[in-house]
Image (cartoon, rainbow, N blue to C red):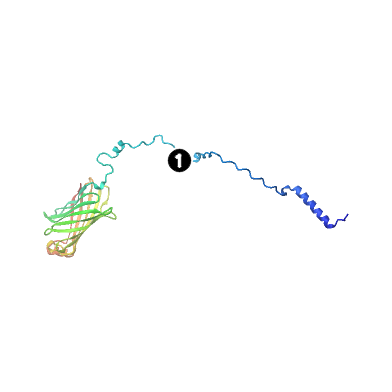
């Protein structure tokens, strides 16, 4: 029998120690082979019922999903007849109706010994887009008409607040009668200024521009202050009518009215007129005043 050596003894001791450790810690053993995959289960023949989430919805939403107790009935012929009574013609186009308005903005009497009646009238007839406009102004002093004219214009709406106008003008006084052909614009400028700007061409190459603006300042729902401003410019002098070249006249007014009714308003105010340049020179040559201020009392009415 061979005598054991030192190295053999060491190997035997290590093997014995390893076997003991494996017995105390079974988790370190080699894992067994994984189990085979279970057979696939057959798909269910019917789909599962959807989950009910109504319990998680707000009460207001649940109430909206409920059927109303009194459902809206269908529209009947009687309902249509009540909505569109005779004369309205269903959904009629409003701009095809013909309307009109007659406005005397200034139907007044000038105070003073030489005062007399004066007027400023605007009349229109037509629809919402196309209209015929008539403008007329005049003044009288000492029992005789000193100035008067009439505009007959066709106007067409080109925007919400503006019209383009074109037509003829007939001057009756001062001087001999005279006819003009003219055109321009009128409408409501920003900050609610009512504006008229019209240019005219007459016989012998005469030209004229007329500008007018007014504003209504509401002190109360009934008391209203109305400032006005008018200007006339001429391209040629016309001594027969007392008109010079350039800015001929400038007229301003301030009137306070009280609206007893919207279409019936008496007023009181002041009016001021000033001649310039050649027109002023012609007035001085005739012994007339270049400027004047006067008290006016009158009525503003429309229908």
Location of the N terminus by quadrant is bottom right
Q: Quadrant of residue 167?
A: bottom left
Q: Position of residue 5 (x, y in %)?
A: 85, 57
Residue 51 left/right relative to 6 = left
Give how far across and how far down residue 106 sits, in percent: 19, 52
Instruction: Name which residue lies at 23% across and 53% down.
Output: 156
Hey, which quadrant is residue 279 in on the image? Answer: bottom left
Residue drawn at x 77%, y 51% as measured from the top left = 18
Q: Nearer the viewer, residue 194 or 61?
A: 61
Name the side, left or right, on which 96 lies relative to 13.
Answer: left
Relative to 244, is 300 above or below?
above
- Taking depth in this image into account, of 193 and 123 the one nearest to the observer is 123
Q: Nearer the viewer, residue 238 or 204?
A: 204
Q: Looking at this rendering, what residue extends furthest in the right direction?
A: 1
Q: Is residue 94 visible?
A: yes
Local secondary structure at mark 1: helix
Which residue is tagged 1? 61
Residue 30 percent coordinates (x, y): 71, 49
Which residue occupies the foreground of this view, 42 or 23? Answer: 42
**In the displayed structure image, the side of residue 73 where residue 235 appears, left or right:** left
Residue 194 visible in the picture: no
């Amino acid at each position: 029998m061979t005598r054991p050596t030192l190295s053999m003894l060491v190997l035997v001791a290590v093997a014995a120690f390893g076997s003991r450790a494996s017995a105390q810690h079974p988790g370190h053993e080699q894992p067994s082979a994984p189990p085979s995959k279970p057979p696939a289960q057959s798909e269910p023949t019917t789909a599962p019922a959807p989950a009910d989430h109504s319990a998680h919805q707000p009460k207001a939403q649940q109430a909206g999903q409920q059927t109303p107790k009194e459902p809206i009935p269908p529209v009947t012929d009687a309902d249509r007849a009540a909505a569109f009574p005779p004369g309205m013609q269903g959904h009629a186009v409003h701009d095809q109706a013909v309307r009109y308005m007659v406005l005397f903005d200034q139907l007044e009497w000038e105070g003073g010994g030489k005062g007399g009646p004066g007027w400023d009238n605007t009349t229109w007839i037509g629809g919402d887009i196309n209209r015929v406009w008539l403008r007329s102004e005049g003044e009288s002093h000492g029992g005789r008409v000193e100035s008067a004219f009439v505009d007959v214009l066709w106007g067409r709406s080109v925007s919400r607040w503006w019209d383009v106008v074109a037509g003829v003008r007939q001057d009756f006084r001062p001087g001999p009668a005279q006819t003009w052909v003219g055109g321009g614009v009128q409408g409501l400028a920003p900050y609610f200024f009512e504006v008229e700007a019209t240019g005219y061409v007459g016989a012998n190459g005469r030209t004229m521009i007329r500008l007018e603006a007014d504003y209504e300042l509401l002190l109360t729902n009934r008391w209203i202050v109305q400032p006005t401003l008018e200007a006339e410019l001429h391209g040629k002098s016309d001594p027969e009518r007392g008109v010079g070249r350039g800015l001929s006249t400038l007229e301003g007014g301030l009137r306070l009215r009280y609206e007893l009714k919207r279409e019936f308003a008496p007023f009181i105010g002041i009016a001021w007129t000033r001649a310039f340049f050649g027109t002023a020179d012609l007035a001085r040559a005739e012994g007339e005043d270049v400027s004047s201020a006067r008290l006016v009392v009158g009525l503003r009415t429309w229908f």
